[in-house]
């Protein structure tokens, strides 16, 4: 959990947050949220946070990309709750960040695999259609060829009957 004030927003940070971001408690207490958000996600985070502070709402959640001290990035789900006085002035805030990096990366891998599978399925469907057309053409050719063979067999059988009759008479 992170307690925030206006001068140094990251106060009273627990050990898990320090481990998650790779900073000591002393180091993280000197940082602003801008130092922890990935550059592409700072604006969205600040926009949502500003909207929360200006509204009468007390919480907001956001999927965000964060930067560790090492420079490595990870996905985090942040939940911020604020406490206000009777005049709706911000008294304190608690932020909780859950490391959901593996979950997001797995979802991206699954999406990529799903798209690859969809593409392979489309190729397979196309191949099956082509093979079906080839088989239909081959079947038509086989039927034609079988008809020709039947005609040949009939003619050959008919033509061979006369010599067989003569041979039969000679044998008798």
Image: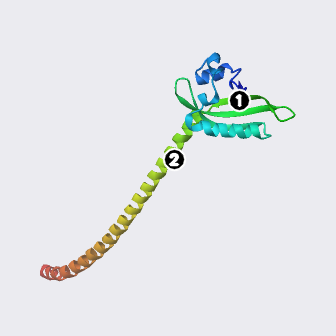
Please identify the quadrant where the C terminus is shown: bottom left
Q: Element under label 1? A: strand
Q: How far across and down, in percent of the image, does residue 110 sit?
A: 53, 42
Q: Residue at x 38, y 62 (%)?
A: 130
Could you say which disc has been placed on residue 35 in the image? none
The answer to which image quadrant residue 162 occupies is bottom left
Against 27, is 167 above or below? below
The answer to which image quadrant residue 49 occupies is top right
Q: How far across and down, in percent of the image, does residue 141 sit?
A: 31, 71
Q: Residues within 10 Å of mark 1 (few under 14, many from 20)?
A: some
Q: How far across and down, in percent of the image, does residue 44 sit?
A: 63, 40
| The furthest residue to the left | 170
State yes or no: discs 1 and 2 in contact (Cβ < 8 Å).
no
Position of 152 compared to 70: left or right? left
Q: Nearer the viewer, mark 1 or mark 2?
A: 1
| The furthest residue to the front | 7
The residue indicated by pointer 1 is 95
Q: Nearer the viewer, residue 34 or 105?
A: 34
The residue indicated by pointer 2 is 114
Please identify the quadrant where the N terminus is shown: top right
Dot 1 or dot 2: first in sequence order is 1
Q: How far across and down, in percent of the image, does residue 35 sit?
A: 59, 28
Q: Residue at x 67, y 33 (%)?
A: 78
Q: Residue at x 26, y 76 (%)?
A: 148
Position of 106 compared to 94: left or right? left
| The furthest residue to the right | 86
């Amino acid at each position: 959990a992170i307690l925030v004030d206006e001068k140094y927003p990251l106060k009273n940070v627990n050990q898990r947050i320090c481990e998650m971001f790779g900073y000591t408690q002393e180091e993280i207490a000197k940082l602003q949220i801008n130092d922890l958000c990935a550059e592409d996600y700072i604006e969205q985070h600040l926009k949502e946070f500003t909207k929360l502070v200006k509204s009468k709402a007390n919480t907001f959640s956001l999927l965000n990309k964060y930067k560790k001290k090492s420079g490595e990035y990870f996905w985090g789900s942040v939940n911020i709750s604020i406490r206000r006085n009777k005049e709706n002035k911000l008294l304190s805030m608690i932020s909780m960040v859950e490391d959901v990096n593996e979950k997001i990366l797995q979802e991206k891998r699954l999406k990529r695999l799903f798209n690859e599978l969809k593409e392979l399925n489309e190729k397979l469907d196309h191949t099956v259609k082509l093979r079906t057309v080839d088989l239909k053409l081959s079947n038509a050719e086989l039927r034609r060829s079988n008809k020709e063979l039947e005609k040949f067999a009939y003619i050959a059988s008919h033509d061979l009957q006369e010599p067989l009759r003569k041979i039969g008479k000679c044998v008798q």
